[in-house]
Amino acid sequence: LTWGMQSDGIRPAPGPNSAESDDGLPPGNEVVPGRYTIELTLGDASGSIDATVLADARQGISQEERVAAYEARQALQGLFEASVSALERIVHARADVDTIMKLISLQPNADEDESLKDLKTLAGDVKKGLDGLEKRFRTPAETKGIVFDDDKVTSGINMAMFYVGSAEHPPSPTAQVYVAQARRMLEAGLAEVNDYMVTDVAGLRNAVNEAGISLLNDTGPVEMPE
């Protein structure tokens, strides 16, 4: 086993090609010079060893500057984690809406019952809204061709990560501008997701419950005929 002197990274965003996380989180930012304890555990057995990460003296950077740069990278990693959480909520909610639409279609007289037809239309509208929220954060994987994506939340965060991670020193004034922009983009995107979940998605959930449509709703016993 080799430790690349990196802290834990962030789980990948949900998608058709999401990496498996059986081996834990992907590597993240390189740690600052210092003394660390590495612990390995396998079943009930464990062991540890101390390791010292040394600074590259040729860089001429103080420990305080290294710590400041590391903390800036970690803060951006936190922004990326929040964007992943938002995308997970969007993807999971959309999968639930697909299930709801299928359940509606399986109801007796689904094609004639106006209330069920209205409910299915509502579910379709909510799904379109979720699609729009995903596009607020990233370009969907199924998108064809080359599209402009500088206005996406994840693009803003990635740009800030590029500028902050391009030097060992604390963020430059230019990098700080991109960090501030990424924070504004994420804050606005999260506000939209949170509002949509407590209004439109919650409204659909209530409408579905009132219609008596749910999973595992028929758990009563089957009576033995006389």
Image (cartoon, grey):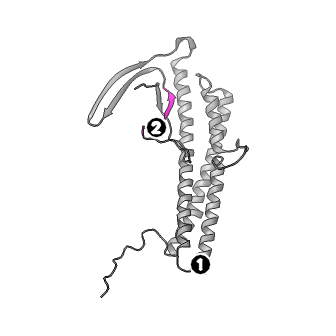
**Residue 77: image x %, image y %?**
54, 36
Residue 77 position (above or below residue 36): below
**Residue 186: image x %, image y %?**
62, 45
For label 1, the residue is 115
Residue range of the region highlighted in magenta in the rendering: 22-31
Q: Is residue 222 left or right of residue 145?
A: left
Name the foreground residue: 107 vs 200: 107
Residue 216 position (above or below residue 17): below
**Residue 26: image x %, image y %?**
48, 35
**Residue 25, labelled with which disc?**
2
Give amino acid for label 1: Ser
Name the image quarter holding the C terminus. Answer: bottom left
- Magenta region includes residue 23: yes
Q: Contact, CB < 8 Å: mark 1 with mark 2?
A: no
Farthest residue, direction front: 226
Disc 1 to disc 2, how far (Cα)? 46 Å
Q: Earlier in the sequence, mark 1 or mark 2?
A: 2
